[in-house]
Amino acid sequence: MTDLTTLWELGLPLAGSGGGLWYTKARAPRVYWSVAGLPMARVRFAVTYRSTMDVCGLTVQPSRLRAFVVRNVARRSDVQPVPPKVRRVRGSSTGMRVTLRLPAGLEPADVIAASERLRHAWGVHSVNVVETKPGFVELRMTGYDVLRRVKMPRRIPSGQLAVPVALREDGTAFVRDYLRVPHALTLGANQSGKSMYLRNLITGLAPLRVALVGIDCKRGVEQRRYAPRLSALAMTPDDASGVLDTLLEEMENRFDLLSYHGVGDLWALPDEVRPVPIVLLVDEVAELFLVASKKDEERRDRMVTQLIRLGQMARAAGIYLEICGQRFGSDLGKGATTLRAQLTGRVVHRVNDKQTADMGLGDIAPDAVVAVTTIPPDKPGVAVAGDSSGGWSRIRTPELSADEAAEICAQFADLTPLIPALAPYRPVISTRTPAGGSVPLVNPIPAMD
């Protein structure tokens, strides 16, 4: 009876703890990783580090001096291969980061090639390799799928025009920094999460000192709700052409201002004379390329030329492009590939054809095309982000409803700059919401009134 009582007293708490850990692992992976996953991963890493590096081919033969010291001072006949030296090990709520000093003969590409083998050897969800400085790499390990439930990290890089938009698969924030990457192309099929990405971008820009200009040729069904924070909105191809013409004139005027002050960039101007930066948001770029009749071809060619000119020169004038679309290919017409070449940043969600993935990432990161084609339909918001450096990573945007985005834009409506040249295209706000899809019989008021 005493044995049964002891078994009951010990077994019940153990069973409860095991069940609690299992439940925590499924419902609260951050808590499980911090309590159990991280300690086990650190022990496994410390115990198996040398052997894992050896079998993964990440060791080099020791130098002659080291071999001499081992044989003559340590009195050992066998000289072990030298793995990268561990400089620092840090744990976090999502994974573990290890800084390695590479020995002579190894390069970051060798570690990147072995990242999948390291992932299985240490039992973590993913291993991403980042070169921090010459001779040093950082292994960013995640203990679970951080993209399954997106939770943005507390520490996020900041800047004048830096907007955290999504979460990377290594647990860090994907930041859209317009000063580093002035122009970008975002692609994605229906229900892929492209609109969610744009909502997070607009709401991130809303509190900043920046003018937002929208082009949504689908009669404004996507961007009309952000009208309180938009300095201009074009809802038809004719209006889009006018807005682009106005932006080109604004760019020329800003170049005159830069020339007068003897500087080559908007941010080098004194604060009192610096114009507000402008972000142009094109919701569906294919609507600017496609034409229904021959008489529209002249307007199409003009708009494409305008976009290319903005992409080539507008950065110095503080005008930035954010081009979005469901599909993008050379068959859109002349100028498509030329425009793409000006768009440094690339974000590609799930697409319907491989050509769009190739146009989005094939010219800067060919390996990323395969990652795009494997995005499942049941994970909206998952995308592959790349840049001209050849690096790429999987990201996912946090969920944000259209009503929440519209509310944030209305909250910061007082920050909407008034650009006189764009005043004719200033959107209006209805005082009542139309019911049943009918046209509202209301008097519109300007967004700033």
Image: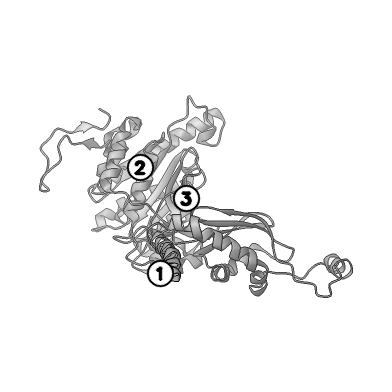
Task: Look at mark 2 in the image and give the residue it sits on.
Answer: 203
Q: Taking 386 as reference, is 52 above or below it?
A: below
Question: Residue 345 placed where, x, y %?
Answer: 47, 53
In-front residue for pair 444/2: 2
Nearer-N-terminus badge (2/1) = 2
Label 1 is placed on what type of residue? Thr
In-front residue for pair 295/268: 268
Nearer-N-terminus badge (3/1) = 3
Q: Residue at x 41, y 54 (%)?
A: 185
Question: Residue 278 placed where, x, y %?
Answer: 40, 38
The part of the image, by quadrant, that contains residue 382 is bottom left
Q: Evaluate if marks 2 and 1 touch, with contact meaning CB atoms under 8 Å apart.
A: no
Question: Residue 303 placed where, x, y %?
Answer: 35, 49
Q: Taking 154 as reference, is 13 above or below it?
A: below
* CA distance separating discs 2 and 1: 29 Å
Task: Look at mark 3 in the image and give the residue it sits on.
Answer: 173
* CA distance separating discs 3 and 1: 22 Å
| Element class at badge 3 | strand
| Element class at badge 1 | loop
Q: Taking 388 as reference, is 247 above or below it?
A: above
Task: Look at mark 1 in the image and give the residue it sits on.
Answer: 374
For the C terminus, give its image quadrant. Answer: top left
* CA distance separating discs 3 and 2: 16 Å
